Amino acid sequence: MTDGEELPGPRSVLDVHVPDRDDLLVSFVPEDQPGDGVLVVTVAQDRTGRRIRVPVGEDVELIWSSRRGPRARTARVLEVVTDGEPTWRLEPLGSVRDGQRRGAVRAEVLLPAVLTDGARSVEGTTLDLSETGVRGRWTVTEGWPAVLDALTVTLHLGDDRVVSGPAEVRRGFPVTDGRLEASLVFTDWPERAQDQVRARVFERLRQLARRGDL
């Protein structure tokens, strides 16, 4: 089953660990699954968007978010399918266990971002983003926001994807156009929201790689 506990559910974002590699790899679970005990995922990519070669018969470790926190399970590559977006057909092995996500990956990306605190609200733009925080520029309203302020940040990730949650201003300094450049740390964000941001970061890294900017 793919309920998010024993196996990652459709549209999940996966960390993938493969033998002899220590870098962060990412994969996604397509909506359509065969339902025959096989798990289909996209072929893992590194932070530059390059697909990773893993031989049939090799084992990989999958880590994903669930209601209980990060989960991990070993799976064996049964087949590499190259029609359309390359995918792996995987055989889940053993039992699921608690997992640990790898470090956050950051990308330079410009997205609309709104800060709110009660009736106060300022609009701005992100400069770079990870699932643990954001750096951006916002209009200053009567000295707000300021360092150590707790507030809510809403990110517009594109394609009608919007995530929102609490954050704290960690660093800030004025810039010449009257706005504040600030770094915020997300606090107590649900795993689902972090996954959405993580997916958007990797999407941006793939764009940069295609342009040769990485």
Image (spheres, grey):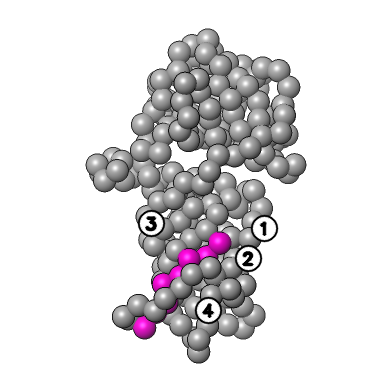
Residue behind mark 2: 166
Q: Where's residue 23, x and y in %?
A: 45, 33
The stretch in magenta equals 178-185
Of tags 3 and 1, which is closer to the observer?
A: 1
For disc 4, the neighbor class at 10 Å (few under 14, some 14 to 19, many from 20) is some
For disc 2, the neighbor class at 10 Å (few under 14, some 14 to 19, many from 20) is some
Q: Quadrant of residue 148?
A: bottom right
Query: Does residue 72 appear left or right of residue 56 in this picture?
Result: right
Counting residues from the N terminus, which is met first, the one under dot 3 or under dot 1?
3
For disc 3, the neighbor class at 10 Å (few under 14, some 14 to 19, many from 20) is many
Residue 146: which disc?
4
Q: Secondary structure at mark 2?
A: strand
Residue behind mark 1: 188
> Which amino acid, mark 3?
Val
At a point 50% along the width and 78% down the height, the residue shown is 122
Depicted 42 relative to depicted 179: above or below: above
Counting residues from the N terminus, which is met first, the one under dot 4 or under dot 3?
3
Q: Where's residue 211, x and y in %?
A: 25, 44
